[in-house]
Amino acid sequence: MVETVEFTGTILCAQQLTLGEGPTYDPTTDTAWWFNIKGRELHQLQLSSGEKQVHALPFMASVLARIDGHRQLMATEDGLFLRETDTGVLTFLTALEPEKPGNRSNDGRVHRSGALWIGTMGKSAEEKAGAIYHVAGGKVTTLFPQISIPNAICFSPDGATAYYTDSKIGHLMTVKIDPHTGLPLATPQVLIENDGALGDFDGAVCDADGDIINARWGAGAVDRYDSSGQHVARYLVPARQPSCPAFIGPALDRLLVTTARDGLGDAATPADGQTFELGITVRGRAEPDYRL
């Protein structure tokens, strides 16, 4: 039987974001970062001090990865950029889909090899308009084309398995990958079939035990699955549309979850779009740095 855990956490940020997404955490500065994609904002929260900053962006962006103590990688609707952590100065790095100006970046994550898996989608979620790419050393390789809404990209602790979904299809996929490069070694297989009754698969992280922790858009919950696809637990969230989790805190034992108000209209509640800490204890892992 699946354990259901009531929300006992806290609000990390009460701002009601249209599309909160792409959270990550830098343990060297105890700082959480996340995006308001449609609001063209990057949010920064220093956890120990509670100091919060919001950085306006010139475009929609969705993924941030640490490169070193001074630079970050940012995935945007205009491709990949280097960001100076202290000044916010952006420098173009490489294009993803220059022939598709109607697309934007969505879900992504860095593999232990230092390579980035990054998904794209149509700005109006057009059918099969996007793809999932592997980016290493500036080289962009198409992994899975004709993706409508790429999500749930994460990797097992040993780097030998990747997970992802197309939220419009609703299957959580698994694929064996090279732990040294992050490139696929086999054909993807369906790990979990989802009929939508439990919400749509959205962003995900993989913990130190190899469990998949997945935000369930539309269900007001974050679900935990073991590596065999067994549903282990459901953690309730006050907002209807959780979008992505991230491990936070010096011990990486806390869980941040972004949410969204997008599409809710007058049915939105004050909690929709807020950013939460779930109040549960997890065995998290630090995100790898992107390797230029």
Image (cartoon, rainbow, N blue to C red):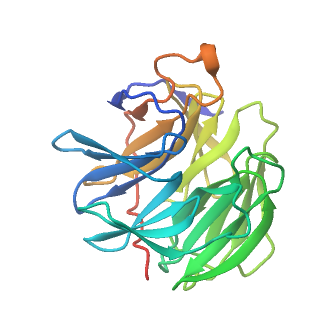
x and y percent of residue 105 in the render? 61, 58
x and y percent of residue 63 in the render? 50, 58
Q: Nearer the viewer, residue 70 or 230?
A: 70
Q: Residue at 27% of width from left, 59% of height from top? A: 27
Q: Residue at 73% of width from left, 47% of height from top? A: 167
Quadrant of the image for the N terminus? Answer: top right
Q: Residue 145 vs residue 227: left or right?
A: right
How many tags in the picture? Answer: 0
Q: Residue at 78% of width from left, 35% of height from top? A: 196
Q: Residue furthest left?
A: 49
Quadrant of the image for the C terminus? Answer: bottom left
Q: Is residue 197 above or below residue 26?
A: above
> Is residue 170 something one can see in this rendering?
yes
Quadrant in the picture for residue 147: bottom right
x and y percent of residue 191 in the render? 75, 56
x and y percent of residue 29 in the render? 22, 58
> Is residue 212 something one can see in this rendering?
no
Q: Is residue 186 above or below residue 150?
A: below
Quadrant in the picture for residue 185: bottom right
Q: Residue 31 vs residue 76: left or right?
A: left
Q: Residue at 47% of width from left, 39% of height from top? A: 258
